Image (tube, rainbow, N blue to C red):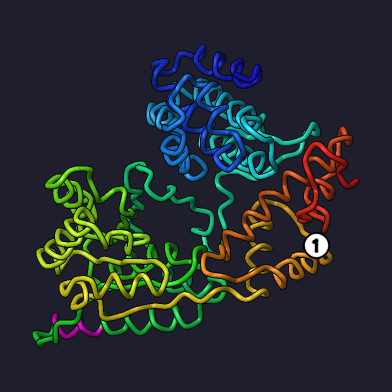
Amino acid sequence: MPEDLARAIDELEALDVASSVDVCAEAAALAATVCHASAGAGTAWAVAFGLPAGEFGHAAAVGSSFDEAPTPVLADLDSAGGRDRNRRGAYARGLAEVAMAAASLGELTIAALARATVIGNAQLAFAGVTGGPANAGSASVGLPKAGLANPANPDIGSTPAPPGVAAAEPEVAPADERTLEDLLAELDALVGLEAIKTEVRHQTQVLRIQALRESAGLRNPELTRHLVFVGNPGTGKTTVARLVAGIYRAVGVLPEGHLVECDRSELVAGYVGQTAIKAAEVITRAVGGALFIDEAYALAGDDFGGEAIDTLVKEMEDHRDDLLVIVAGYPAPMRRFITSNPGLESRFRLTLSFDDYTDDELVEIFSRIASGADFSPTAATLDHLREMLRVEPRTEGFGNGRFVRNVFESAIVRQAWRLRELTEPDVERLRELRPEDVDASLAVGGEAAS
């Protein structure tokens, strides 16, 4: 085990905030998600934690949410209230140290350092700690916190579990209690997506009028409310799904309006007969709100997925008045998925297409992410980013908002490295992102731009 990582884990265990087993499992998941894309990391991780290399992918999937939510141990400390404030902060600092040390498992890359920085600062933020060890480079440079929330489209940084890897429990977004006007205003504030905004407004008006007709004792034709979202990753599908769930609640269609996010791994079990039970449990959590199934087409094509689809169709019928289902994925596979089961085809009448963002829209998303994290890219930096986007292939799977978020995460690491020799850089330098900070040719550990 690398010396820094071993020391960080020992210090984490020494805090005695939870069982050693829980702390080590949490550290292993955090480390795996930091170095998951690094060459040779799987073997190095297995040696470091004394675990089978085959568990590396699962551990990375478990840790993939640590930039958006506190780890389970930290969450338990947080729920204990103010009396654990000091231990909560100490544990979050320990997690940040583990994250930075884990970046050296396998080949050290900018991506691993950026991931470590983001996760470390996220855990510090969840613990209410300002500042901390999760900074790249030797300069004391403050970096953004808490998953780099994007004011444009918050879901662009979500990290799905690798295909075929068991993921954590389905994510549940709490019910949005805002007014219809506030929800629609947030929808309008999203970058791009003009056709989506128009369609959601149309659907909202139909549902509002149906509710008024019902309250007046008039009959309504039965219209399915379920939706299909198609498009590349990072185009705002999850963000819009959360807003739609809130909008449906605001117009009286759903009683609660929360959103349960899942994929195949949360719906399908490993044995015949168990999938129906597992899928029903997840769907039950969504009743009263919305169920969002990402990459839903992965359910089609085998008996286990077919069992999950049959369960979904039955639950949609049983809860036609208090459940919204949104399925999402790439256009062609989603068409095949919807037509694979007559019950699905009859329940999904509306498909919303999320187009790739234009270069200007991606630059605006980058600017919003930077501004929200107290960074200021120069005009030359944005021009440089626009040139990068111009030559970036837009094949199926292009990350859109996630792509520019990854560029930003790498840029903050490069900026920190660029400022490594400045003991007390001024605020302007701490905020400024230069063109060289988004230069893909820069290598950590080599000759950095000054």
Is 255 above or below relative to 127? Answer: below
Percent across and percent down for residue 264 are 31, 53
Q: Is any atom of residue 341 visible in this view? A: yes
Asked if the magenta segment contains residue 276, the reply would be no
Could you say which quadrant of the image residue 18 lies in?
A: top left
Q: Which residue: 45% across, 26% down?
A: 82
Neighbour tally class for label 1: few under 14, some 14-19, many 20 plus, Cα within 10 Å: some
Q: 311 or 324: nearer the eye? A: 311
Side of 179 where 383 appears, left or right? right
Is 76 above or below relative to 357? Answer: above
Q: Which residue: 79% across, 31% down?
A: 138
User: Which quadrant holds the N terminus?
Assistant: top right
Asked if the magenta segment contains residue 212, the reply would be yes
Q: Is any atom of residue 70 visible in this view? A: no
Q: 97 or 328: nearer the eye? A: 328
Percent across and percent down for residue 296 are 32, 62
Location of mark 1 (residue): 381
Give the overall secondary structure of the magenta segment: helix
Side of 336 where 311 appears, left or right? left
Side of 108 where 348 appears, left or right? left
Q: Which residue: 63% across, 65% down?
A: 365
Q: 132 or 79: nearer the eye? A: 132
Q: Callout 1, which amino acid?
A: Thr
The stretch in magenta equals: 209-215
Q: Which residue: 50% across, 25% down?
A: 46
Percent across and percent down for residue 258 are 30, 57
Image label count: 1
* Element under disc 1: helix
Percent across and percent down for residue 133 are 67, 29
